[in-house]
Amino acid sequence: YHQLEKSDPDVIQKIKALYKQAMASDAGLIFNDEYYMDVFPHAGHPMHNDGEFFAGAVHAYTHHYDRLMQYINDPQTPEAVRKYALEMVKLLKTRVFPRRNP
């Protein structure tokens, strides 16, 4: 996150905007590490600030992509959550990790 602040401030602004969307819908919980790390209950806190939100999204994207996509595509996932989560996945794919396949 801090490296992006210097190298790509536009991405940081997009993360901040997505964080605001997340706080208005489910507090960013789709990126909560707790959902992806069975051995660490209470592991994540994406609702605390945009840096923690980004860290949770990166963790889910880089280590648990299939599960993340299952959560996003679950019919019970609210549309507002699906929207910001898909936008974050796109941002990670195209701007943060453009050379990496999830």
Image (cartoon, grey):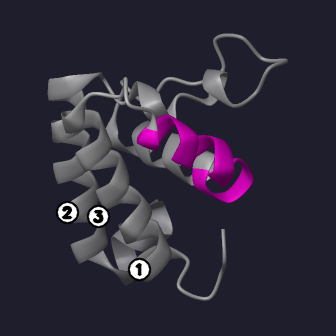
Q: Nearer the viewer, mark 2 or mark 1?
A: 1
Residues tagged 2 and 3 counted as in contact (Cβ below 8 A): yes
**Residue at 22%, 62% in the rendered image:** 14
**Residue at 41%, 80% in the rendered image:** 95
- Compared to residue 64, the image places residue 78 above or below, namely above
Q: Which residue, given by chain and number where applicable, does mark 2 sit on?
A: 13
Q: Quadrant of residue 7?
A: bottom left
Residue stretch rendered in magenta on the structure: 61-73
- Compared to residue 65, the image places residue 41 above or below, namely above
Crowding at dot 1, Cα within 10 Å, few <14 / some 14-19 / many 20+, comes out as: few
The quadrant of the rendering that contains the C terminus is: bottom right
Q: Quadrant of residue 97?
A: bottom right
Query: In front: 87, or 4?
Result: 87
Q: Which mark is residue 95?
A: 1
How far across and how far down the image is residue 21, in percent? 17, 39
Whole-angstrom CA distance, mark 2 to mark 1, is 12 Å
Residue type beneath disc 1: Arg
Q: Nearer the viewer, mark 1 or mark 3?
A: 1
Determine if the magenta segment contains residue 22. no
- Compared to residue 54, the image places residue 101 above or below, namely below
Query: In front: 72, or 28?
Result: 72
Q: Secondary structure at mark 3?
A: helix
On the picture, is 67 further left or further right than 14? Answer: right
**Residue at 29%, 56% in the rendered image:** 15
Residues tagged 2 and 1 counted as in contact (Cβ below 8 A): no
**Residue at 58%, 24% in the rendered image:** 44
Residue type beneath disc 3: Ile
Query: In front: 11, or 30?
Result: 30
Q: Secondary structure at mark 1?
A: helix
Mark closest to the chain's N terminus, 1 or 3: 3
Residue that sits furthest to the right in the current view? 39
Q: Which residue, given by chain and number where applicable, does mark 3 sit on?
A: 12
